[in-house]
Amino acid sequence: MTTVSGGKSPVRWLFAPAVEDVPRGQAAAAVFLRVLLGLMWLDNVAWKRPPDFGEESGRGLFHFTSLAVSDPVFPPYSWVVEHLVLPNIEVFGWGVLVVETALAVMLLTGAWVRVAAALGVAQSLAIGLSVAFAPNEWPWSYMLMIGAHVAILFSSAGRMFAVDAVRSGFPARRLAAIWGAVAVVVGVYSVVRSAGDPLAPLGPGLRWADLSLGLGQYNLAGGVVLVVVGVLLLAAARGGTALLGRAAAVVGFAAALSLFAQIGFTDPFLGGTATSAAFLLSTTVVALAVAGARHRSSPGD
C-alpha cells in the first residue's frame, strides 16, 4: 500500500497519478476493485432522474434520501436532510447525479484515481447515513463501500488499464484498444437488438438487471454512435493521429450531453439513461487521454 510520501503535499499526492511501483498481482487486484466500484456507480446513476428526482411519485432518490428522516442514523444529519436537502431536491438531485457520474467515469477509466476514491468515501458515507437503518437494509453494505474506496485511495489502482498510467507516461495504445473494442461490442449489440424498434426511447443495451450490472442502454442511433466512437479509438490505438482521439472525444461528449439534456424531460434520441451518458463520458475521457499522449509522444510509442 502506498502512503503520502516523496515530499508531496496531501493535495498534490491526491491529484498525482496512482501508479506507484508495486507487485503486479497487487496492482491487478487494486485495478479489479477500482473497476468493480466504477461499475457499481455506473449502474446506479440510472435511477437519479431529473427534474424532480422522484419527489412527485415518492420514489427514486427523493424516497431514499427521505429515509434519513424516517429512519435516522445520525440525528444532526437527519435534520440537514429534512430542512435543507428535501425542500431543495431538484438542486440536490443534480448534485448527486454529477457526483456519482464523476465517480463512475473516474473509477472506470482510472483517471485521477485518488480523487475519485476520496469522493467515493464521502458519497458512501452520505448514503449510509441516509439508509443504513431503513427496513431491509444491511448497514455493513455501506461500511464495506467506504472501506473499498479507502483501499483504492492508498493503492496503485491507476497503474494498469488507466488514464493515470497514461498521465504518468505509459503508452496509451492498450487503453485505447480496450475501450475501443468494448464500445464497438456494446454498440453492435445495441444495433442488432434494436432491429424491432430502432428509435425506442429506451434501447436494449447491454445490461444484467438482476445483478445491477451493465454498460448502459442504447437504441439503434445510440448503438451507431458507440460504434463510431469505438472505431475512432481503435484507429487511434493502431497509430492514428491525435485528431482521431479528439474526434472520438467530441462524438462521445456530444452524445452524453444530449442524453443529460433529454433524460427526464423528453424521450432521449439515443434511447439511453444516465448510465449510458456516463459510459459515453468514460469513452470521452479515454479519448482525450489518448489524444494528449499522441500529441506528446513519438509515433513508435
Image (cartoon, helix red, strand yellow):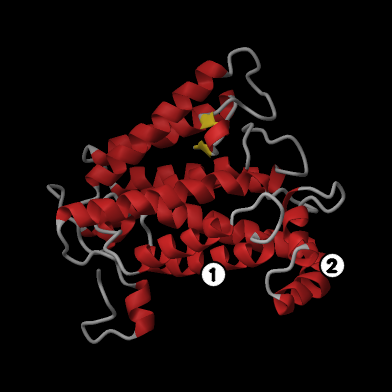
> Quadrant location of the N terminus?
bottom left
In the displayed structure, 262 sits above or below 167; it is: above
Rendered residue at 25%/72% (across/down):
2
Compare marks 2 and 1 and give the one earlier in the sequence: 2
Judged from the image, the secondary structure of the residue bearing numbered disc 1 is: helix
In the image, taking residue 1 as reference, residue 301 lies left or right, namely left
> Picture coordinates of residue 3 (x, y %)?
27, 77
Q: Nearer the viewer, residue 117 or 138?
A: 138
Q: Residue at (21%, 67%) from the top-left corner? A: 20
Label 2, on which residue? 87
Q: Nearer the viewer, residue 48 or 186?
A: 48
Q: Which mark is residue 29?
A: none
Residue that label 1 marks: 122
Q: Nearer the viewer, mark 2 or mark 1?
A: 1
Residue 112 % position (x, y): 38, 64
Mark 2 and mark 1: Cα distance apart in space: 22 Å
Q: Is residue 299 left or right of residue 211?
A: left
Assign a secondary structure to mark 2: helix
